[in-house]
Amino acid sequence: MNDQIIVTDNLTKKFKKNISVDGINMSIERGQIYGFLGPNGAGKTTTIRMLLGLIKPTKGNIKIFNQNLNKNRIQILQRIGSLVESPTYYGNLTGRENLEAVRRLRNIPEKRVHEVLEIVRLTKVANRLTKEYSLGMKQRLGIASALLSEPDLLILDEPTNGLDPSGIQEIRELIKQLPESGMSVLVSSHLLSEIDQMATEVGIINNGKMIFQDSIDRLRHKRKPILKVGVSDGRESHSILKGKGISSQWKNDYLWLEETKPEFVSEINATLVQSGISVYRLEEVTKSLEDIFLELTGTEGSL
Amino acid sequence: MKHLLKADKIKLKRSSLPIIILLVPFLILAYELVNLTYRGDFVEKQAEMFQADSMWTYLLYDNSLLFGLGFPLAATLAASIIANVEHQANGWKQTLSLPISRVRVYLSKFSWLFISLFFSTTIFMLGMFLLGNMLGFEGRTPWKYLIGDSYSMLVVILPIMSVQFWLSMTVKNQAFSILIGAVSSMMGLFLAAAQTTRWFPLAYPSQASTVILQYEGLGYNQDLSAYLVISFCLGIILLVLGSIQFAKREVK
Ligand SMILES: Nc1ncnc2c1ncn2[C@@H]1O[C@H](COP(=O)(O)OP(=O)(O)O)[C@@H](O)[C@H]1O
Ligand SMILES: [Mg+2]
């Protein structure tokens, strides 16, 4: 398949005895914005470092652009722009000089520096020393260097970390428009809401293991609201509904149903009341992100 | 490689590297200026006692100990400044995920270390020339010895450069490499004092002068060519080993 941008096979990294990344099979296709989601310490940065050849996998394989990373590291890196964790900035240089250093290295035309400065809105402060930059400005400078070479694949590790809400919004909008020019993006975050707002695909990593990998729609489906019904006799209600071919669950003293359409709700209500059950509550409940995470991992965890 | 050298040059902008490059030659030349003017009489007597054929010869001999102590320190600090630019910037992960071989990244920065120290010795040589002329030294300027004295140091210091550079590049805390560099520069002086240990490469910088004090007075340093050959070979070997190790490292 030509459209596979990143494929990892059983990718594993051990530090001494700790397994930080445990048998990950990641798959990213051209034009996707792949949200790589997981709590702090889940193994996102470690995975990304392996994808960039900064550290060697303990086990497993990485293919990027259909080439083996081990054998063709330099050719592959030629087509990648990246930002890993806290941003790189040479404090003794201005913003423009920072980009100039990368530009020289990659042998990119000079006008591209102005373009990326414009894209991340640093043109005004381009001639100031970067040690005077705010964290958000440093982060945007990092994104600018990643964009400098007009890469086919952009890898951003927690690019919105430490930004204020408007900065986050800006970067999100920026990332969302990148695939229009044929770019594929891998962006990591520990915030589901953030991934939810920009990704087309999601991979969720927890304790080094990939616990979910699918389209964002499939993840959203898991967040579909459900119906919470308070009834006098749960067991009885459950079997009455079952007799009508409607499945339900009795949990935490409430009856739970998968649908929330108004017609459906009134039908349930009528059915139960007519069977002599008293219904004292009908409520639409949206699962929280934590709930989904709990469902996926089977353990307590915070996203 | 040309692009890489340019990029590394940009990264060194506004760093304190120029100060380090200038510091050692200026301090030593300032000392010699004071020595040759305020203690002029004493110096002349001493030169006579050492059977120096000219004041040039005396100058070349007199500064070799200070230069031999100071230049390894300058190399240590210069290596640290060049490597620290990257440590401070959190820059390794960015630089090493660009499409360039890691060995080249290493060699480009080493080139800047070499170039810096080349400037330093060149300034030292020109400084000696100016000083001699300013003070009206008699006889023709012994360019051969002046050049030999300055650039021998550059070769003799190669092993120290390779080791210090590797330390600074791989250990983030620069206090560590600077401490090692300072201790080994001083150890070099002690090692140079004894007949057997003076063949240890750390001891070469203080013995790398073209003119040394021998039994029969000041004369040409017969061992210099051996020092040069050993240092050059050892320096290159250590540089290659350092670059290979650097290329294999995990990037934090
Ligand atoms: N160089 C290292 N040595 C030892 N352990 C490490 C190293 N780098 C990361 N780890 C461990 O690996 C785990 C995953 O870390 P990381 O990939 O940074 O997580 P994330 O980016 O998802 O927050 C953590 O438990 C961390 O302590
Ligand atoms: Mg991380």
Image (cartoon, coloured by chain):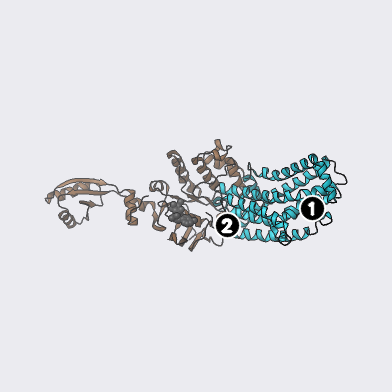
Which residue, as the protein is rendered here, is positioned at the far right? Answer: B139
Name the kind of residue labelled 1 in the image: Gly
Residue under pointer 2 = A75
Residue closer to the observer: B35 or A106: B35
Question: Is A272 on the left or on the right of B208, as rendered?
Answer: left
Residue under pointer 1 = B148
Q: Position of residue A221 (x, y in %)?
A: 33, 51
Can you tell which chain is drawn cyan?
B
Which residue: 79% across, 45% down?
Answer: B128
Residue closer to the observer: B84 or A91: B84
Can you tell which chain is drawn brown?
A
Residues under numbered marks 1 and 2 in contact, where contact means CB atoms less than 8 Å apart: no
Q: Is residue A135 visible?
A: yes
Label 1 vs label 2: CA separation?
A: 45 Å
Helix, strand or loop at label 2? It is: helix
Q: Is mark 2 within 8 Å of ligand 1?
A: no
Q: Position of residue B62 (x, y in %)?
A: 78, 48
